[in-house]
Structure formats: C-alpha cells, structure tokens
Amino acid sequence: MRVLLDLNVLLDFLLDRVPWNADAAEIWKAHHEQQLMAVVSAASLPTLFYLVQRAEGREYALDSMRLVFDELEIAWVDSATVQSALAMTGPDFEDNLQIACAVQQHTDAIVTRDPADFIASPVPVMSPKELLRTIP
C-alpha cells in the first residue's frame, strides 16, 4: 500500500505528540519494514521544518528533515500539481495540494487525523488507526 502522510501525522511522530505518537510511530515502523510505502508532499517540508524548529530548535528540525528525506519518498510539486490543486473545489489550498500530490503519486490513501479537510478527495482518506488495521 502506498500512502501520502499528512503533515499532522509527521508532526505526531517527530514531536512525539501524545496520544497520537504511538500510531504515527507504528506507521513509520511499517514503512521502515516495507509493509507500506509512505510518501510526503514536498509542499509540506517548509511547514514541517518551521513547526519542528519552533517546538524543538533548529538542530532537531534539521535532523528531522534529514530523517524524512532519507526515509520517506518525497512527492514533487510542479506546475501541473499546483494547477490541479487550484482547480479543486476544497476550501483550503494546502489540503488541495496534498490531494493533488496523492493523485499524481498514485497513492492508495491519504493518512490524516483531519479527514474532514479532504472530504472532496478522489483518493481515499484514512485515519492512522484505520491504516494500521490494514497492515497484517
């Protein structure tokens, strides 16, 4: 299974945010053990860096970015991705960009704790718990 991880799932893992950190760590482990392929949108990386740096400092944020870059597949964002996101009816451009990346990368699902943000997604949306139930 190939999934796009929303920013909140990555933050739960990197910042060890209770109570969601356990599910995020299990997803990371499943990816590491090749039970699934986790993808992150390149558009998420600046926000990820900013929020991790604010919470834990620059060095931890840089280490986190290296970890994400080394471990996860990065979904590119190009003009076609942006045009696709702009054509979507969802109210939030950032979420539309996530959806456009998920479509472009042929993912099986978007994994998020905020499924209402992706109500119009043509890609199925799953919570971290729902994803974990699909892994044998």
Image (cartoon, rainbow, N blue to C red):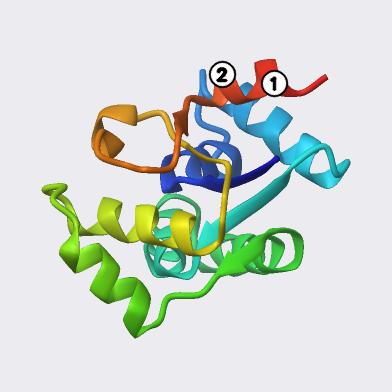
Left or right? Give the position of 41 relative to 21.
left
Left or right? Give the position of 73 relative to 79.
right
Q: Quick one: label 2, few (<14), some, or many (20+) residues within 10 Å?
A: few
| x 55%, y 61%: residue | 105
Q: Which residue is mark 1?
A: 134
Rendered view: 23 above or below 84? above
Q: What amino acid type should be assigned to the residue bearing mark 2? A: Glu
Q: Which residue is mark 2?
A: 130
Cα separation, mark 2 vs mark 1, equals 7 Å
Left or right? Give the position of 76 relative to 68.
left
Rendered view: 51 above or below 70? above
Left or right? Give the position of 105 relative to 124.
right
How far from the left and from the top, in percent, is residue 71?
A: 75, 59
How far from the left and from the top, in percent, is residue 125?
A: 43, 32
Quadrant in the picture for residue 51? bottom left
How far from the left and from the top, in percent, is residue 82?
A: 29, 74
Marks 2/1 in contact by CB < 8 Å: the verdict is yes
Q: Quick one: label 1, few (<14), some, or many (20+) residues within 10 Å?
A: few
How far from the left and from the top, in percent, is residue 6?
A: 45, 45
| x 16%, y 51%: residue | 92
Rendered view: 17 above or below 59? above
Q: What amino acid type should be assigned to the residue bearing mark 1? A: Thr
Badge 2 element: helix
